[in-house]
Image (cartoon, helix red, strand yellow):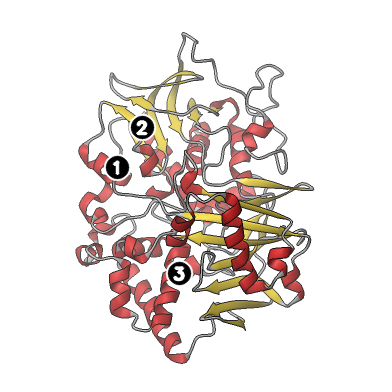
Amino acid sequence: MTGPEPATDRRLSRRRLLGTGAAGAAGYALAGSAGTAAAAKARKVDVIVVGAGLAGLAAGRKLKQAGRSFVVLEARERVGGRTLNVDIGHGKVVEIGGQWVGPTQNRVLKLIKQLGLRTFKTFVDGDNLYYRAGTLQRYRGTIPPVGPTVLAELATVLADTDSMAAQVPLEAPWDAASALEWDSQTAETWKLQHALLPETRDLYDLAIASVFAAEPRDLSLLGVLFYTHSGGSFENLINTAGGAQDSRIVGGSQQIAIRLAKRLGRSVVLGAPVFEIDHGNGGVEISTRHGRFIGRRAIIALAPVMASRIRYTPALPARRDQLTQRVPMGTVIKCMAIYDRPFWRDQGLSGMATSNTGPVKLTFDNSPPDGKPGVLLGFAEGQEGRDLLGLPQSKRRAQVLASFERYFGSKARTGALRYIDKSWAADPWTRGCYVGYYPPGVLVGYRDAVRASVDRLHWAGTETATEWNGYMDGAIQSGYRAAREALERL
């Protein structure tokens, strides 16, 4: 483990590392870069990593373990990428970005343990709520209280999705026997052919939006099937207990990145956006306001759309550049209301609601491990999120609390002590969440361009993962894979 921060050079402080405030901090301040933009001497390393999200930090971890020199450059004044803790007082946080982990996400679960972190189960005790056509119903289990014909059709849709997904090779989805057929249609087209009942279609739409923060009409069917296979099954993706939403991290998910960065010490440089990468002349050179960095290879640990905003000299091959033009980010506004206590638990409710009425169609109990204070979490995803873009937070708050009131009663509106939300589409260094997704034609048309190295450049980020693509576990897998590629070619 890296030792304490030197008394000199405290420019990257504990608060900047968190990006939120001191709650949950590791009590450690990253050291600054080796110099300023005015410094004449460049810092030379084996590998330059761009991006200090989980993918970039995971890559840095492997490089350090291999004894190689490296630097991780991060545009933000914090680490964590699409994970972000928000201080809610009394040493407690909520996560305004990615937060959940679940079974079979073995890389992130192992890393959590190695970093000395703990998990706790998402609160699921009590009845869930299902709102449709003005009617609110209570139920237990994972499936809303739909009629037998809807239930049967929904079961068939899920089973067919899993059956097709199992036929998609994780390393090369474009090689599936039906790849061209599946990549030539949207999930919407497939839904209209296989789900005939309006309620089944609504539930399918909600499930897709909850996973991709996009609409079925946006997504290649092949892309949905690959994503499903990467997570094991579609039910794995949408389930809470035993699924992808099974557990949270004590102290917030950003602690994974914070503790990783602590161990990498002075190799992490914050506030250093990368606008241009020169990868000619036998090496890689990057200039930032914190100095010049020269490496033998580079790992770009960014979503494709953000990697495309960097200028490359020489220019990237047309296939890679065209690919990055075609992998947009999802749209989600993550919203939370904080109460003195989780009052819904007194009513025997889990805090989970499913609805066909927006802007919030999905809610969870997001309270800290001890249940104090009470926190209701809601998502405005896909089109619902797009409709809220550009609205001031006061208007978003009113619409979100109206949704909470619809499900949990007037106290959900009148009892809110604080409201927090984040539009990830408005974040200048992310421009969307949860993940970059594939419209029709992209997987078959551009194949492995999403992660095939270019010259001395390697690509990481959860969008390049083959297992748990789109999740924290996938980000870590991608970082390890890109580091391994770089190490093999040094």
Q: Quadrant location of residue 360?
A: bottom right
User: What residue type is disc 3 on?
Assistant: Ala
Residue at figure coordinates x 49%, y 15% from the top left: 37
Q: Which residue is mark 1?
A: 452
Q: Residues within 10 Å of mark 3 (few under 14, many from 20)?
A: many
Q: Which residue is mark 3?
A: 207
Element type at marker 1? loop
Which numbered disc, 3 or 1, marks the residue closer to the eye?
Answer: 3
Query: Cα distance, mark 2 to mark 3?
Result: 34 Å
Q: Work out whether residue 438 or residue 381 is closer to the camera in this orientation and state it.
A: 381
User: What residue type is disc 2 on?
Assistant: Ile
Q: Work out whether residue 321 or residue 481 is closer to the camera in this orientation and state it.
A: 321
Q: Is residue 426 visible?
A: yes
**Residue 247 image position (x, y, % from top left):** 62, 61
**Residue 60 image position (x, y, % from top left):** 50, 35
Residue farthest to the bottom, as pictured: 148
Q: Which residue is mark 2?
A: 310
Check the image and report above or below for 243 versus 466.
Answer: below
Q: Quadrant of the C terminus?
A: top left
Residue at figure coordinates x 68%, y 32% from the top left: 14
User: What residue type is disc 1 on?
Assistant: Ala
Q: Residues within 10 Å of mark 2 (few under 14, many from 20)?
A: few
Mark sitting on residue 464: none
Q: Quadrant of the N terminus?
A: top right
Q: Work out whether residue 382 or residue 81 is closer to the camera in this orientation and state it.
A: 382
**Residue 228 image position (x, y, % from top left):** 40, 65
